Amino acid sequence: MTDYIPTILGALGAIAGGAATQCFTLWRESHSGNKARFRDMQFIGGELIIRLIELRYQCREAGDDNGTPTMVNGQQEDIVTTHVEDFSLGDVQGKWESLPPDLQFRIREIPSRLKEIDRWLERFYAIHYSPPENSEYFGHRHDLYYSIANSAEELIEILRNICKLPKSDLYP
């Protein structure tokens, strides 16, 4: 019986050593995976922040546009002069899956929200056409574009916080 004790202790030591090695390897891999995921999140977060800053600026400009007096069909009318460019996310570099799903959704819905605003404003203009100022139209336009600008501002702050990126000096 005493001949088997060293063998049993050796086997138990080997099993414990193997388990400890596996635990350490799993910890190291998850730690390096978390670092890589965080770097991916910072990379895509940085690009999205720049795009959202530009969108915020354009939406504020469009919201503040009260039209330019123009002669249309022999009468003076205020016409929109500032438009928001298409906000496309198709060419964003980076791993979207590194961002939290709710944040991905809120960012990815922005192009649809902008299209819906354009459709709504077209319908409103067609129904509530009131030259020369079209003040009701421009009031709604201001509110709708500022809601997108405020959403962009909120998303910028969320991205900065989770990606631990500094505040930008672009378009204060």
Image: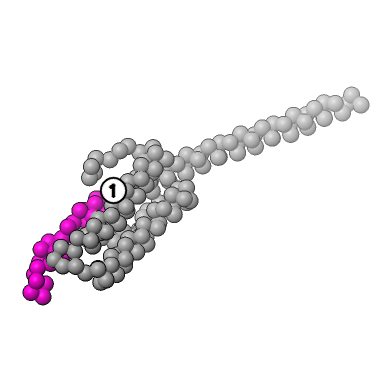
In the rendered image, residue 102, in percent from the top left (x then y), is placed at 47, 50
Residue that mark 1 sits on:
53
Which of 80/3 is in front?
A: 80
Q: Does any portion of residue 51 appear in the rendered image?
A: no
Neighbor class of circle 1 (other Cα within 10 Å; few <14, some 14-19, many 20+) is: many
- Which stretch appears magenta? 51-79
Among the 4 quarters of the image, the one containing residue 14: top right
In the rendered image, residue 77, in percent from the top left (x then y), is placed at 12, 67
Which of 164/148 is in front?
A: 148
Residue drawn at x 65%, y 37% is: 22
Q: Say which quadrant the N terminus sits in.
A: top right
Is residue 80 covered in magenta? no
Q: Amino acid at mark 1?
A: Ile
In the rendered image, residue 18, in percent from the top left (x then y), is placed at 69, 35
In the rendered image, residue 13, in percent from the top left (x then y), is placed at 74, 29
Q: Does any portion of residue 136 appear in the rendered image?
A: yes
Residue drawn at x 89%, y 24% is: 2
Which residue extends farthest bottom?
A: 73
Residue drawn at x 32%, y 53% is: 148
